[in-house]
Image (tube, rainbow, N blue to C red):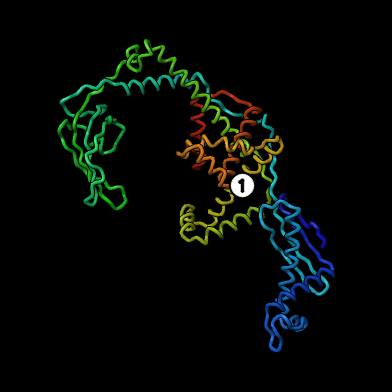
Amino acid sequence: MERVVKTEDKNMVVCEYTFTKDEIEEAEEVALRQVVNRVEIPGFRKGRAPKQIVRSRYPETVKSEMIDFFWQKIVKQIDEQENMLLPPVLVDFELSDNRARMTIEVHRLPDVEIKPFEDFELKKVDKPSVMKDYIERKLKELQQTHAILEPKEGPAEYDDMVRVKMTITTDGKVIMNQKVSEYVLYKEDDRPVVSEIVGKKSGDVVEFDRDFGEGKVYHYKIEIEQVNKRRLIDISDELAKTVSAEYETLEQLKDAIEREGNELYEKEMDEFLKTQALDSLVKTSQLLVSERTLSQLVETVFDKIRRDREEYEKLLKDHDNNPEKLREALKNYYITDLKETYSIRKVARENNLDVSEDEVQNEAENLAIAWGISVERAKSILRSRNDIFEDVRWELLKRKVAELIVQRAKIVDVKPEELQNEGKEAQKNEDN
């Protein structure tokens, strides 16, 4: 078998395979045996018919078996020599007594071109600005939390706190029975459990219906037990002492809030920088993939989606009932996905980054918290579920790549409002 590269387009190679006369004879011999064992010819026991009779009666079947024989040889060689993104595609074939030729599309794993990390610019929110806003916001939250409650006889007003008994029924069934709740009547909260209470006083009963669009109407009965006026303590030494006995002055409380804020800031900025690092890697990397590969990938997925009528109609509706828009969305998704996957793999490979089995197992403590199970149970899942193990390993590898980029990239401080404006501009561009 001889292989000649006819054309090459990035990751896609079109190869022509030709076979010798001996290989053609071998293929015919194998094909005839296959057909002889399957067909029944009058006058002969199954599997005993002469090959020349089988050849004359079933020429197309024999030809099909020969093509399959050649195809299997080609696929075996490709599997041994290439790293494939998609299965090989048969483009053309020619088969005669003296000649056998197949033209195959080979879709390799695509490469990516990655810019130097030193060219990446990552943004870090200016710490003094963040801390100033954080301390002010936290003090106001504490002021609200530690408000002094004073019972009042008159009607409830916005910013008052109420204690109520709430009963909810639907279709004659009680789904909440006189549950006692306390909450503040904030003006920006437009729910009926707030708006219907304003203007009412202790002892009043409020009833109303709500329809959440589920085909059921819920009836609310709210008994107002107590209305309290909330008096906010000035942000002063008095507030600090009210928050905790360990504080004597407002400055002590501010210092504690600042320490808490510093820890939170460092943690959030670390994650923010790593997220930017991976985003920059994907955005700036150049994916070396053939349009033909993308087309094959999209059509394969499109056909699979179309076989699920309900899913297909849902996705089609999300794309203006236009199949071409759905195809374009799938293409963009796979471009981004391929860029992320192969850029991360390339960075990891070129920088000797890897994730050991022990590192994955050590992640069990964090997973246990996220999953709400014991650490031992999380470890057991990682040992028994290879798919979950590989997902965790991949996330840890992404983290290592992100940390490497952050170490080498240029980091600039920006004001919070600058990031907010950039976010609004990005959203505007996305909407357009």
Query: Residue 21: x and y, percent?
Result: 84, 70
Residue placed most toward the observer, 325 or 93 = 93
Query: Residue 88: x and y, percent?
Result: 69, 59
> Is 119 displayed left or right of 229 in the figure?
right
> Is 431 displayed left or right of 241 in the figure?
right
Above or below, comparing residue 184 to residue 357 in the picture: above
Residue beneath the point at 82% across and 72% down: 25
Residue beneath the point at 33% across and 20% down: 143
- Which quarter of the figure is the N terminus placed in? bottom right
Residue beneath the point at 60% across and 40% down: 393
Query: Residue 381: x and y, percent?
Result: 53, 44
User: Which of the 4 image quarters holds residue 285?
Assistant: top right
**Category of crowding for the residue at label 1, using alpha-carbon neighbours closer than 10 angstroms: few (below 14), some (14–19), many (at least 20):** some
Q: Amino acid at mark 1?
A: Ile
> Is 420 displayed left or right of 98 in the figure?
left
**Does dot 1 land on a helix, a strand or a loop?**
helix
